[in-house]
């Protein structure tokens, strides 16, 4: 009985503290009460271990931008050596554990995009998650996994560039895939890039994340 009484007293005191400090009703307080919103926050707002603690989506976008920039430099390089050098910079942005040093943030696009998919699915599976979270989580996770698939294909190309005599064509393919990391691909040629498997990239994932957050009343 003593433990239950102490627990009740602590809960009452904490509730009073939240009211006094103005925490009650804030996004932070709502996230504590809503596990789905906590996981959405990991994707959209902040996540431990990312550069500067940014959300997983922002981390993925930043690494994808670095990969695209250096894929473009690889394609534009005038010799095989330059192409291979910039390809290694692309690799660092995709998966920094596979290459020592580079211009990426050190977190890696693949890790960040996989985190986006994992945490948005955890949000959908959380107790009390709304139908909107369940629906948009599919769109976000699918687009994030499309991005991971493209990044893994890029890694295969970079590995093959080491011994290939046709480095230029590989660098061109690398540039095309890198552009799709964010923009996605109109795979069915209907004039738009959707979220579906084989189409959406990080842009689509971010668009649906914004729709999800608005439907949940999260953010400004």
Image (cartoon, rainbow, N blue to C red):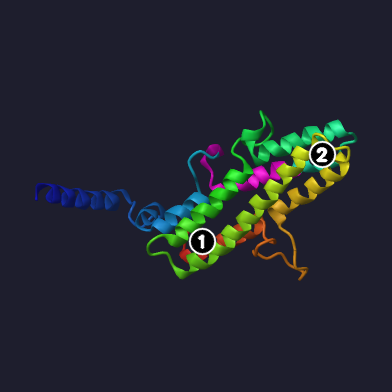
Q: To which quarter of the image does residue 106 belong?
A: top right
Q: Residues within 10 Å of mark 1 (few under 14, many from 20)?
A: some
Specify whether 209 is left or right of 62: left
Label 2, label 1: how far apart the Cα atoms are: 37 Å
Residue 83: image x %, image y %? 83, 36
The answer to which of 31 and 120 lies nearer the viewer is 120
Vertical side of 186 occupied by 111: above or below: above
Which residue reaches farthest left?
A: 1
Which residue reaches farthest top?
A: 100
Residue 32: image x %, image y %? 36, 53
Residue 210: image x %, image y %? 56, 60
Q: Which residue is mark 1?
A: 213
For the stretch drawn in magenta, the main secondary structure is helix
Residue at 53% over, 47% down: 55
Vertical side of 181 occupied by 108: above or below: above
* Magenta stretch contains residue 87: no
Q: Nearer the viewer, mark 2 or mark 1?
A: 2
Residue 24: image x %, image y %? 33, 55
Q: Which residue is mark 2?
A: 74
Q: Residues within 10 Å of mark 2 (few under 14, many from 20)?
A: many
Residues rendered magenta in the picture: 51-68
Residue at 66% over, 36% down: 104
């Amino acid at each position: 009985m003593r433990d239950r009484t102490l627990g009740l007293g602590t809960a009452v005191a904490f509730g009073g503290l939240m009211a006094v400090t103005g925490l009650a009703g804030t996004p932070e307080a709502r996230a504590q009460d809503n596990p789905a919103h906590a996981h959405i926050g990991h994707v959209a707002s902040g996540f431990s271990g990312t550069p500067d603690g940014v959300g997983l989506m922002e981390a993925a976008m930043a690494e994808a931008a670095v990969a695209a920039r250096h894929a473009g430099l690889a394609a534009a390089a005038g010799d095989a050596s330059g192409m291979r050098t910039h390809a290694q910079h692309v690799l660092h942005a995709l998966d920094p554990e596979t290459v020592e040093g580079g211009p990426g943030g050190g977190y890696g696009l693949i890790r960040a995009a996989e985190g986006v998919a994992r945490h948005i699915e955890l949000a959908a599976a959380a107790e009390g998650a709304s139908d909107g979270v369940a629906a948009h989580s599919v769109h976000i996770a699918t687009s994030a996994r499309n991005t991971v698939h493209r990044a893994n294909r890029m890694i295969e190309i970079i590995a093959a560039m080491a011994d290939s005599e046709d480095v230029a064509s590989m660098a061109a393919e690398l540039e095309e895939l890198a552009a799709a990391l964010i923009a996605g691909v109109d795979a069915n040629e209907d004039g738009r890039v959707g979220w579906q498997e084989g189409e959406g990239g990080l842009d689509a994932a971010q668009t649906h994340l914004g729709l999800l957050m608005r439907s949940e009343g999260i953010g400004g």
